[in-house]
Image: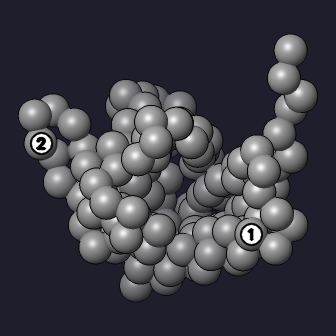
Amino acid sequence: MPKPLPTRLLHVTIERRLQDVYDFLADPANMPQWASGLGKGIEQIDGKWLADTPEGKLEVRFAPANDVGVLDHEVVTTSGESVFIPMRVVANGDGCELTFILFRQPGMSDDKFNEDTAWVTRDLETLKTLLEA
């Protein structure tokens, strides 16, 4: 059985109603506004969401719409490997809490994991600024 991957739990408080945040994040077309790692854009072609990245077109699969704040997605790399990205949004008074679990991928160096952590943290801050504006 494979050993569990190291993870980092990233978090941001957003001063906006849960439903507003969920609705924005659940729409794949909004990802380029905050997720800089997905390149210049994302479009739906033949029922698949494809992100235009420096590595080429990558498929992004999204959790189905739900009532419990699950916003998981999966990025399929050019080599065909899948990177699972769990995200959750939960209510906190008039605002909400967004959590993002970053998995350290096999063979990833400490420096690269730290770089990815900083990158996702910046993206979550961009999201917070966008949604609170």
Q: Residues within 10 Å of mark 2 (few under 14, many from 20)?
A: few
Judge from the rendering whether residue 16 lies leftward or rightward of residue 9; answer left or right. left
Q: Where 123 falls versus 56 (above or below)?
A: below
Mark carried by residue 127:
none
- Specify whether 101 is left or right of 36: right
- Image coordinates of residue 82 in percent, x first then y, are 52, 36
- Closer to the camera in the image, 100 or 37: 37
Could you tell me if the residues under marks 1 and 2 are in contact, i.e. CB atoms within 8 Å?
Answer: no
Per the image, the residue denoted by label 1 is: 112
The N terminus lies in quadrant: top right
Residue for badge 2: 45
Q: How is the image coloured?
A: one colour
What residue appears at the point 74 percent right and 69 percent down from the top-left corner? 112
User: Is tag 1's residue or tag 2's residue first in the polypeptide sequence?
Assistant: 2
Q: Is residue 110 visible?
A: yes
Task: Indicate the quadrant where residue 45 lies.
Answer: top left
- The residue located at (77%, 57%) in the rendering is 108
**Front-most of residues 30 and 14:** 30
Quadrant showing the C terminus: bottom left
130 up-or-down from 103: above or below: below
Look at label 1 and name its amino acid: Lys
In the rendered image, residue 118, in percent from the top left (x then y), is placed at 70, 77
